[in-house]
Image (cartoon, grey):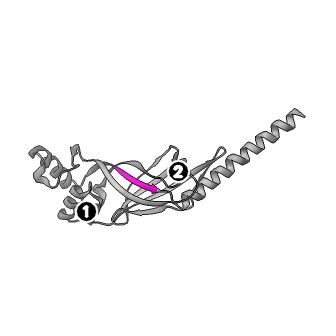
């Protein structure tokens, strides 16, 4: 008799967890996603955040970036902040997130975040996504003027003069199984 009660309790608890995860996944699908901002921007080892042009850099910093550009290497590190607004009357949650950053339809970076994120009903949160990449491989698609505009305008998303988008694919955990969204949500960086 006791074993039947234990088995029934395990089954019921798994069912309740599965239903809760499914409801949170449905709420997540109906959330609004937008690009909020970029912070902690560096090019090479030079902090670019808040700088408007090469004139705002030291001679050593300008020389370092110029050498990288001539070598068709441009290591960039930044944090992209994605806003998730939950208009639903229930909590939305994800357990993991895959992302791809594209510039002019070319993948420049990808990664994942392995942490649970909850967005309560009516709440808007920002998810910081750390990005580190060398965009040297796509430099051919840009003029030197466009490269410097992108570099100095990254901290202000409305000033980015090229087509950039962030694709995100959330996952939820149901029991011990990770279930991934069948497709990516696309967030245009341009506002």
Residue 12 place in picture, x, y as percent: 76, 44
Q: Pick the residue in front: 62 or 23.
A: 23
Q: Earlier in the sequence, mark 2 or mark 1?
A: 2
Left or right: 24 as drawn, with respect to 185 = right
Quarter of the rendering occupied by the C terminus: bottom left
Magenta part of the chain: 79-84
The residue depicted at 67 percent of the width and 45 percent of the height is 175
Query: Alpha-carbon neighbours of circle 1 within 10 Å: few (<14), some, or many (≥20)?
Result: some
Q: Tell me the residue that label 2 is attached to.
A: 120
Q: Residue furthest top?
A: 2
Residue 29 magenta = no
- Secondary structure of residue under mark 2: loop
Q: Which image quarter: residue 52?
A: bottom left
The residue depicted at 19 percent of the width and 59 percent of the height is 148
Residue 32 place in picture, x, y as percent: 47, 61
Quarter of the rendering occupied by the N terminus: top right
Left or right: 92 as drawn, with respect to 137 = right
Res. 159 mark: 1
Secondary structure character of the magenta stretch overall: strand
Kindly report the distance in space between the C-alpha atoms of the residues bearing marks 2 and 1: 31 Å
């Amino acid at each position: 008799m006791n074993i039947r009660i234990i088995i029934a309790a395990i089954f019921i608890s798994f069912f309740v967890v599965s239903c809760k995860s499914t409801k949170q996944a449905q709420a997540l699908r109906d959330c609004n996603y937008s690009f909020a901002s970029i912070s902690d921007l560096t090019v090479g080892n030079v902090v670019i955040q808040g700088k408007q042009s090469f004139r705002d850099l030291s001679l050593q910093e300008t020389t370092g970036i110029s050498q990288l550009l001539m070598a068709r290497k441009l290591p960039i590190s930044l944090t992209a902040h994605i806003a998730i607004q939950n208009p639903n009357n229930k909590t939305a949650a994800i357990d993991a997130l895959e992302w791809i950053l594209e510039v002019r339809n070319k993948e420049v970076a990808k990664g994942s975040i392995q942490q649970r994120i909850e967005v309560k009903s009516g709440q808007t949160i920002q998810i910081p996504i750390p990005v580190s990449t060398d965009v040297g491989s796509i430099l051919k698609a840009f003029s030197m003027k466009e490269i410097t505009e992108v570099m100095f305008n990254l901290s202000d998303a409305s000033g980015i003069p090229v087509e950039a988008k962030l694709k995100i694919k959330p996952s939820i955990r149901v029991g011990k199984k990770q279930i991934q969204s069948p497709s990516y949500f696309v967030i245009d960086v341009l506002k």
